[in-house]
Image (cartoon, grey):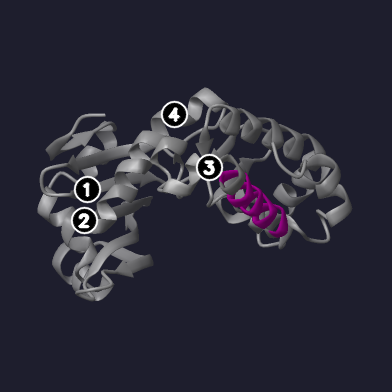
Amino acid sequence: MKNSSTIIWNDKKAEKLFSDFTVETFMSFAKETPLDLEKRTGIETTIMREHADKNSGEINRRVTKIEIADNIFFLKKAEGVAFEGIRNEFEAINVLPEFNIKPPEVVAYMIDEENRAAFLLLKELSGYCSIRELITGKAPKVAVADFIERKEAILTQLADIMKQVHSAKYTYPDLFAKHVYIKQGSDDIVMIDLDRFRPMDKCPWYFDFPILSSFVKAKCWKKFKRSLRSEILPSKLLNRLLPRWH
């Protein structure tokens, strides 16, 4: 991906929909309320998640849902100390296909290394449901039924994928049921929120020590299994299909 202070478009339709938007327009989505944004742009938005700088208290990272002309996009924007997360996500999106993981579709992005500012405009995962939605019954009934029928195959596939990820010396501590998406009748697995999907040489210093590194990764894997635990995926099944650690 290019490093640039200008917008790089990967989708002509999205580029047309946002034809009036500049870099400044996208970056301002982390500084205005949804009401202010709608008044200024005429676009309906929802703040999904945001984080503030610990020192200044200013919002430096935000995920915004954008609804425009019957299309849904998610804008991830960060600057300052939060910039690294967006850059990590860019790199992760390029790497995921190597592990048979389908990345979210990036329709536009901007990465400005010099000013430590970036945004990522993602297309909605149409037809996909998170595993969390499936195990809590918040997904459509037909999707839940399909997942129940294929759950062992899906978990086995997911375990194989993560084995490849770890063998390639990558880590993903935010692997949770809410971040893994599947589609009815499809073998595709999509992962989102990838700002901490990274090679181990970019991890904290203690990853240089095998014992500490193994402890941290095992703890993350345990949290992932806990996020799956439900009536549909009881502990006995999870322990059988998802080894303690790869």
The percent position of residue 141, horizontal first and vertical second, equals 73, 55
Please state which amino acid type lies under the numbered disc 4: Val
The percent position of residue 171, horizontal first and vertical second, equals 52, 40
Q: Is residue 145 above or below residue 28?
A: above
N-terminal-most mark, 1 or 2: 2
Identify residue for label 4: 95
Please state which amino acid type lies under the numbered disc 2: Glu
Q: Residue at x 43, y 44 (%)?
A: 203
Disc 1 to disc 4, how far (Cα)?
19 Å
Identify residue for label 2: 79
Indicate left or right for 88 with 115 as reference.
right
Please state which amino acid type lies under the numbered disc 3: Phe
Identify residue for label 1: 118
For the question of whether residue 180 can be seen, the reply is: yes
Indicate left or right for 64 with 95 as reference.
left
Specify the label residue 204 is tagged with: none
Look at the numbered discs 1 and 3 and tell me whether their residues touch, using CB distance below 8 Å: no
Disc 4 to disc 3, how far (Cα)?
25 Å
Q: What type of secondary structure mainly makes up the magenta span?
A: helix
Which segment is the magenta one?
213-226
Q: Nearer the viewer, mark 3 or mark 2?
A: 3
Question: 10 Å neighbourhood of mark 4: few (<14), some, or many (≥20)?
Answer: some
